């Protein structure tokens, strides 16, 4: 199970549930009845609109012949990946940057984590002291040094 979980980490458990249902050639409605659940509940989970809960996870794992805790582990890894995305979406104080620095893009659409190297290099090439201080506060000195050292 560990190897499979490593591959599936970050996926919503509903995606995996849907795949397992198709692999076993089952119908969602019948599976829901077998588990004493509403079919709408399974549909919402397989579409990623609802999270897996422990009670339903145990029922589904038993019915599908899966190891106990399988879907809850997927739910935990999914929750972790979602939280990491929320944390990464943090951005520096944009009011401290002049718009002219990012003349070619909309600052509010920048992926500050993905494009950190480019952003850091641009600020340190063209920015003023206040802008450099804000970007250093946001990324930290180690990341700044690495980005400036790894200049393309």
Image: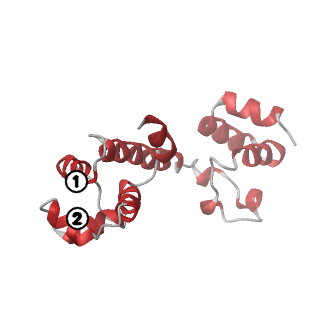
Q: Which mark is residue 78?
A: none
Residue 63, numbered circle: 1
Residue closest to the far right:
152
Q: Position of residue 107 (x, y in %)?
A: 65, 60
Q: Residue at x 79, y 48 (%)?
A: 122
Q: Are marks 1 and 2 in contact (CB under 8 Å)?
A: yes
Apparent side of residue 97 relative to residue 103 in the rendered image (left or right): left
* 89 vs 47, nearest the viewer: 47
Horizontal side of 19 relative to 112 (left or right) equals: left
Residue 143: % across, % down: 68, 33
Quadrant location, the N terminus? top left
Residue at image position (60%, 53%) is 94
Location of mark 2 (residue):
31
**Element assignment for label 2:** helix
Picture quadrant where residue 38 is located: bottom left
Q: Secondary structure at mark 1?
A: helix
Mark 1 or 2, nearer chain start: 2
Q: Residues within 10 Å of mark 2 (few under 14, many from 20)?
A: some
Q: Quadrant of residue 40?
A: bottom left
Please give the name of the residue rendered at 46% of the width and 48% of the height, measured from the top-left corner: 10
For the point 76% across and 56% down, which residue is it? Answer: 101
């Amino acid at each position: 199970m560990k190897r499979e979980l490593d591959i599936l980490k970050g996926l919503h458990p509903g995606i995996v549930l849907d795949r397992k249902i198709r692999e076993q050639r089952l119908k969602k409605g019948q599976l829901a009845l077998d588990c004493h659940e509403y079919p709408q509940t399974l549909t919402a989970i397989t579409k990623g609109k609802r999270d897996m809960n422990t009670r339903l996870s145990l029922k589904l794992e038993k019915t599908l012949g899966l190891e106990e805790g399988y879907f809850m582990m997927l739910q935990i890894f999914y929750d972790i990946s979602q939280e990491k995305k929320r944390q990464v979406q943090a951005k520096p104080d944009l009011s401290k940057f002049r718009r002219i620095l990012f003349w070619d893009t909309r600052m509010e659409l920048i992926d500050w984590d993905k494009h950190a190297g480019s952003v850091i290099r641009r600020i340190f090439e063209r920015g003023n002291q206040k802008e450099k201080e804000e970007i250093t506060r946001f990324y930290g000195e180690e990341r700044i040094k690495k980005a400036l050292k790894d200049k393309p």
